[in-house]
Amino acid sequence: MTDLKPTLSPAITAATAPAGAPLVTVLDAKALAGLTQLDPTGANRLMQRVLTTYRGSLERLLSQMTHARQQSDMAALRLVTHTLKSSSASVGALALSVLCGDAEKSIREGQLDQLPSMLDHLAAEAARVDAAVLQLLSDK
């Protein structure tokens, strides 16, 4: 059986992003504009609420992913990657969404040889996304 234990920390903090990196480019501007159009005046603070909720969900799902990796629980990993794929796309984290889709497909098809490195890459991209979301929230 493939060893699924992470080789990289799945922590999602702004500190993991390279210094001076343009964090907001991690998020698709068109997707963010779509969210803004739902609350054009910002009176309902929709963008802030969506991004704050996403950050909480991201943290919870990555924690679940870490636990599922430690237990080699393919069903839980598939559910986590599926859920994270959709929510990430909705906030414009398109690269993360694609990585989640690739991992989900790999699990579904039983092609697990590359799964550990895929999940490590997914966790690293999640850290970049979290830092970008945090930057957006602090700019608001």
Image: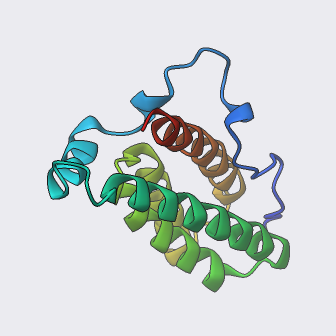
* Residue at (83, 64) in percent of width and height: 3
Residue 88 placed where, x, y %? 42, 57
Residue 62, quarter of picture: bottom right
Q: Horizontally, is 118 left or right of 49 in the view?
A: right
Q: Horizontally, is 10 left or right of 129 in the view?
A: right
Front-most of 139 and 97? 139
Q: Residue furthest top?
A: 20
* Residue at (59, 38) in percent of width and height: 131
Instruction: Judge whether 16 appears above or below 63 on screen.
Output: above
Residue 12 placed where, x, y %? 69, 48
* Residue at (65, 62) in percent of width and height: 59
Q: Horizontally, is 37 left or right of 10 in the view?
A: left
Residue 20, quarter of picture: top right
Q: Horizontally, is 39 left or right of 13 in the view?
A: left
Front-most of 21 and 75? 21
Instruction: Judge whether 78 appears above or below 2 on screen.
Output: below
Q: Residue furthest front?
A: 43
- Is residue 1 at all visible to an observer of this figure? no
